Image (spheres, rainbow, N blue to C red):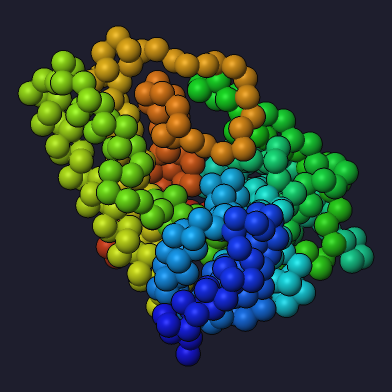
């Protein structure tokens, strides 16, 4: 089994063969992937060495100390955090070889075609149809809240392939080429002025059956892998102390003593402690991933992430007083990533409102925690055994 010493040796060999100071970023990332140092817990030949996931920090620390480039994970968060683990678990060998390398190095960005105007919180009610025609599937429908679709080459897509069975049973999971004819990406301008979200219209889009992940009709089970990883990716991201939203407000408190009041001090202390508890809990959750796939516990972390971001950003606006009401730029933009700490307090306050919607609404996640983590009785459901085509819509 590959141990920390062996990973250190392999990392040193990579740095010697491809000095970061004189190697193009893309060339270095390709070499890192091929050396098995991209995600060490993945199999050999797919960017890993079959090593324990916990040893990734050994590689990352060595490369960071050497000034090596990274793959800008924020730009392709959906690909790295959601698509990749789903492809690894359910993809064919050909699919793994085709998609994982360009995904990890950032050559191909991914988005997620799950939510629909009538199927957000109740995702299994989705109505986008995929009809088999020979070796292809013809897809028609509409998706919404698609982050980064305007920059993406590929999308993970779930569509209804059998309307004659209950809603969870008639779904199939595909990989969709966002450059194919019939894929229409339209911006959704948000309260921040930006349009990082999109709506995507699919009109007679032909997807080869070779781009199907998992079995026909088994898409809901495949999607659970994606969704569990999504919640961990959003709520369980690795942060240093005072990383994330608590950092800017803590800095303002230290640098602007004239803004301080006793009440604000008490609220800041409470949120600082809660942020640190959430950060350490996220670290524990990531350590649990070493032993297997993420479970529903990620829903709890995502809940905490949303609540804290909204409370902290509200406190920051209040702390800054009149300054907190200012906004830097309402220009319509279609950014490549969300930058919470690179903008002003007004942006953080407005953008944080989406945290309790994206990645699963807080209301739905509360049900997941109640039923799957705490083991409480499930809510009564009258549609579990009804064919999708017979549901009221």
Q: Position of residue 101 (x, y in %)?
A: 69, 65
Decide which of 376, 87 is in the foreground and name it. Answer: 87
**Which residue corresponds to the image point at 36% horizontal and 51% vertical from the top-left?**
239
**Residue 292 placement, left or right of 76:** left
User: Can the viewer see residue 104?
Assistant: no
Outermost residue on the right side: it is 134
The percent coordinates of residue 331 (x first, y second) are: 59, 17
The vertical placement of 322 against 215, above or below, is: above
Outermost residue, bottom side: 1
Q: Nearer the viewer, residue 139 or 90?
A: 90
Q: Residue at x 57, y 76 (%)?
A: 13
Count every numbered label the image shows and give the total.
Answer: 0
What x and y, as percent, mark residue 189? 60, 24
Which residue occupies 26% across, 26% down? 252
> Which residue is at the front of the view, 346 or 49?
49
Q: Residue at x 42, y 71 (%)?
A: 58
The residue lying furthest to the left in this view is: 262
- Residue 285 appears in view: yes
Q: Quadrant of residue 38?
A: bottom right
Looking at the image, residue 299 sits to the left or right of residue 119; the answer is left
> Looking at the picture, does residue 226 appear above or below residue 120?
below
- Residue 82 sits in which quadrant? bottom right
User: Would residue 359 appear left or right of 205 to someone viewing this image?
Assistant: left
> Where is the C terminus found, in terms of image quarters?
top right
| Residue 261 image point, x, y percent | 11, 20
């Amino acid at each position: 089994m590959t141990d920390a010493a062996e990973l250190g040796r392999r990392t040193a060999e990579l740095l010697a063969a491809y000095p970061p100071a004189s190697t193009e970023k893309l060339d270095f990332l390709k070499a890192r992937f091929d050396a098995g140092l991209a995600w060490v817990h993945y199999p050999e030949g797919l960017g890993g060495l079959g090593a324990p996931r916990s040893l990734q920090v050994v590689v990352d620390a060595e490369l960071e100390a050497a000034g090596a480039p990274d793959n800008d994970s924020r730009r392709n968060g959906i690909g790295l955090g959601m698509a990749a683990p789903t492809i690894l678990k359910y993809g064919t060998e050909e699919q793994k070889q085709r998609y994982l390398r360009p995904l990890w190095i950032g050559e191909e960005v991914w988005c997620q075609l799950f939510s629909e105007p009538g199927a957000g919180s109740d995702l299994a009610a989705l109505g986008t149809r995929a009809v088999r025609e020979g070796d292809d599937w013809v897809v028609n429908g509409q998706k919404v809240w698609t982050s980064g679709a305007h920059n993406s080459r590929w999308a993970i897509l779930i569509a209804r392939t059998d309307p004659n069975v209950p809603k969870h049973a008639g779904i199939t999971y595909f990989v969709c080429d966002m450059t194919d004819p019939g894929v229409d990406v339209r911006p959704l301008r948000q309260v921040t002025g930006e349009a990082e979200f999109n709506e995507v219209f699919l009109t007679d889009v032909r997807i080869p059956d070779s781009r199907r992940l998992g079995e026909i009709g088994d898409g809901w089970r495949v999607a659970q892998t994606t969704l569990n990883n999504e919640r961990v990716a959003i709520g369980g991201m690795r942060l240093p102390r005072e990383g994330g939203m608590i950092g800017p407000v803590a800095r303002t408190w230290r640098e602007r003593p004239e803004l301080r009041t006793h009440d604000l001090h008490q609220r800041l202390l409470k949120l600082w402690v809660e942020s640190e508890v959430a950060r350490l809990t996220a670290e524990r959750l990531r350590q649990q991933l070493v032993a297997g796939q993420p479970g529903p516990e990620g829903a709890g972390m995502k809940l905490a992430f949303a609540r804290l971001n909204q409370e902290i950003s509200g406190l920051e606006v209040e702390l800054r007083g009149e300054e907190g009401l200012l906004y830097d730029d309402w220009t319509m933009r279609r950014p490549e990533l969300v930058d919470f700490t690179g903008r002003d307090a007004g942006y953080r306050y407005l953008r944080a409102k989406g945290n309790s919607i994206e990645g699963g609404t807080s209301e739905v996640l509360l049900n997941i925690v109640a039923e799957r983590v705490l083991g409480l009785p499930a809510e009564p459901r009258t549609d579990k055994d009804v064919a999708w085509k017979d549901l009221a819509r």
